[in-house]
Amino acid sequence: MAVILRLQKMKHKQPQKEENVTIITEKMVSNELAIYELMEGLGPSLTHSSPSERCAGTQFVADSLHALPKTLLGKQEIAFIMAFCIDRLKDQHSVIPSVIYALLALVEQANLEDEEIQKMLRAIFKEVHCQSQIMTDRRNLFTLFKYCVLHKIKEIEGMGSDFILGFISSMDGEKDPRNLVLLFSIYPMIAQSVPVGPFTEDLFEVAAAYFPIDFVPPTNDPFGISADDLIFGLRQCLSSSPFFAPYCIPLLQEKLDSDLTSAKLDSLHTIVSCCEIYSSEDIRPHINPLWASIRREVIEGASTELEQAALSALHAVMLALHRGTTTTATRETSNQLTNFALMECLGHLTAPEQRLMFPSASLLLSLVSVAEGPANTICSRVIPLLIQQFKDKKEDIARKNTILILGKFLSQASKFPGMKENNGCLCEYETECWEALKEALQNSPMTVQEAAVGAITIAFKALTEDHLNEAARIMTNLLILSDGKKKTLRNAIINSFIAMHSLEAEVLNAQIMPDILLHIQENSSPNVDGHLLECLSLLTLGTGTVKQVLPVVWNHAEAQINQELMLIDLSRCCQYLNCAKDIISNNIKVAECLEFLTEAWNGIYKCIDFSVKIISLTKSDTNNPVKMLEVLSALCRILVSENINTGSMVQSMVSAAMIDNSNTSSTDLIMDLKNKYDLNKIIKEFNSGETFQGSLLVYVYEGLLMGLRKDIEILNLEYLLAAIRKVSLISQSDLSAQTAAILHASLINKLPVGPSLEGILSTCHSELCTALENPELQLRALNSFIWLTKALVIRGHTQEALWVTKLETLLAHDKLGLEVAQRFQIIVKDHSYAFTTQCFPNIRLLYKQRFFEAKIGILGDIFSSSEGCKKQNAMLAVASLLPCLPSLVLRDHMNRLLPILLQGLQCSEATVLEGIVGTLASLLDQSVAHAAPHISTLMPRLLNLTKGHQINVRIKSLECLKALSSLPSPILLPYKNEVVRGLRPVLNDHKRVVRQTATTTRCAWVLVGSPGTDIA
């Protein structure tokens, strides 16, 4: 009773209303209040003389219904509310939206009787004029329709044409894109499920009125409705029922004849969609006009997109006809379309020098690809014509085009097995086809040879086994004998062999690979071109070919050096090693290949053995083997990273670095190396770090340790780290020292947290700080210090601040300050292989952004509070970081960065200047307003950079000026003439891309302050 009184006294204000709805819902769920009592309590409001009061009462009922569980109301209660709502549809127009909202809740109730659905829909169609409602109310109504179609389709079917007429009336004239997307989603279900009767054309026309869609979504549309949403939705509507064919196809035909490319594309895509639903009998009456329109679009070739859409439409039409070839009429129509195509296109194929040959061939190929019947009819006419034409024509362009088209027809025809049987077209002309292709390969200019290779590549399945083997032999000879001028032919052959591997692997393994390997073995001299190795690396796919090729390549690499390390050809040895590396990289993810590489072939041992052999033969840096060792290190790194069972081998090499450790000398690996080479001497020199030969051993350890998984524990690693650190400081080779510094940092990055790591870091910090004070070692020490700092920053170690602070203090150093500033970039710049996921580092999420956020303030303060070299170094340090960071991170620090960037625009270091200008251009493009206070400084400096600097600096400076032109006109007008005059010489820059950018920028500045621009 208290609830009833509360309802009668209720004020329809939003907060109180929501509270009351919650209370009522809880009471009804707990059976303390019945729906009848709710209606009785709302009686004064529902029967009030004021429409607004009745509307509020009805809305309260609707809100309460939406809040109730879907299974709460019984059949009688639903019928009672339904009768009330249907009656209220006759009320004043302002009440109807609330009634619709209430009905939307009622139809979702589980106990709703079937007959109630029909009563409700008939009442809606009779009493509610949908298009008179506002958008949200129309959407509620359409949502109600959708629910009924999805869940109450049998009741809707019982309404027949009454529902169709009501739906047409509701949809007719709808313009809101959100509602249209909703309507387009239910329209196909209605067309397919509800008997349309005599209203087929009316139902079609209500959707066809929107074709073609011409919708551009507003900027920053919160609803995300795109033109494609509407286009695809409408397309499904038009193609939803075969009964629409008499009306839809003429409509599409009409739009195909229009001048709008978008309308043509939409029509062609819709034809494809319709052909999936329409029967052959539906399409047959429209074949002639459809063929004429599609042919016109392909022949004219207005755009590639339009041409492809037209060909797809032709294919779909022919496919639909072919599905219905059980009837005589449809079979005749299919033959008629084929004859039309032959009659109009065959003549163009006899003129291969002219443009119309390719579009005509494309039309025929679209029909050939449908089924064996049209394929046999067309190919039996086209293939002999092309063969004879290739024999008769002598011009290169004619022969090239003819052989290309022949390959395409052979490719399409080979998809049908019957074409290769005794009565098939391919069987009849297989010898003549091969003779034409063979002549094009052997006795033709390079352009024709390329066309022949391309034709064979796509027509493998059309050739017999003997012809395919002969083609492989000829192309292999062409590849072997090709010189530097035939790069395109060489690439075409390689691509053909790669395609052959996936289709005819036996031909590749039995014919092509042995021939290439034999040529390499018989011509093991510098005269053997590197393109054969490139070809081998691309074609060696699968365990079988890896076993066949890799040992041969490796043996040739080893054969390039003799006992005195008198290199026959250093670059050639690297070519073989790079070929081996590519082969391993391409196949190592295959488990069977990995097993072969690491066990049967013993790849890691081979890399170590070859590396130690090279090192043992190196007497000085006169024959510098670093490039070979780098490739071997990379190859070993790949093998180690993929193999989880390398711990023992790595441990033996690490222990071998300890001269006083005799326990490890008995391992098979170490004993074998000691028997072959003077390993003890090399290790001793490595530990001393001074000799060139000894420092080269760092490449062996890099290959073994850089790719090692961090969960593999290695004993005595502290000793090896000390030796590597020494190499990084005192090695005679700069490259070895750099490699040692990177390896040292990478290993420390992977060490587990604990006392051992803390002790190593303490030792490193002490040794490197001491070395920084030694004039002879300070540059090497700084390099190691920077890389070790990077290792700590990447993993987010607690000592990160200690190391970075040391670098900040070094910015004031007389000799090292500039070096520190320029190398700050190392901390955030990605390395080609170190600290990548393939090396299993400890990486903290967003470490670059974290480092920048923590240090930009400190570096900015140093820049602001310092003078002279320290100020310059702080500026360079910040500038070196910027190119490696996302622009969104930098944008938040615009006010702090701009003064530093302005100072950096005067930097003489070309690389730093390029990074600064590039970063500035990116920032101004996103947020130009921050630059307004600095405009007087920016203008002359940017204008100066547009002339006489590197091309990237000139382009980015122009982009900066272009971005600045979007500032308010009062700020820019004092500089307009200066910029326009200053850019005039840049219009004659010797680089076209600079001239283009300068033209765009100058035009933007010429328009500054003109009518229509921002003058506020």
Image (cartoon, helix red, strand yellow):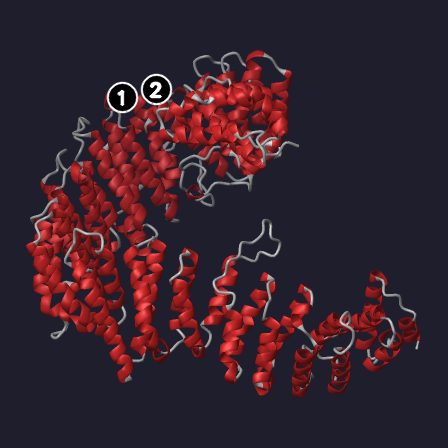
Residue 919: percent from left, percent from top: 51, 30
Q: CA distance from mark 1 to mark 2?
A: 9 Å
| Element type where label 1 sits in the image | helix
Classify the position of the N terminus by image quarter. bottom right
The residue to which callout 1 is attached is 621
Residue 714: percent from left, percent from top: 44, 40
Q: Is residue 808 visible?
A: no
Residue 66: percent from left, percent from top: 73, 72
Residue 948: percent from left, percent from top: 41, 19
The residue to which callout 2 is attached is 732
Q: Is residue 406 left or right of residue 63?
A: left
Q: Is residue 839 visible?
A: yes
Q: Is residue 178 left or right of residue 736?
A: right
549 shown above or below 905: below
Q: Nearer the viewer, residue 462 or 822?
A: 462
296 shown above or below 203: above
Q: Quadrant of residue 328?
A: bottom left
Look at 23% across and 69% down and name the residue there: 340
Look at 46% across and 32% down and name the residue there: 1000
Look at 40% across and 56% down and name the residue there: 261
- Name the amino acid type tagged 1: Asp
**Label pair 1/2, CB-CB below 8 angstroms:** yes
Q: Nearer the viewer, residue 341 or 615?
A: 341
Q: Quadrant of residue 932?
A: top right
Within-10-Å neighbours for mark 2: few <14, some 14–19, many 20+? some
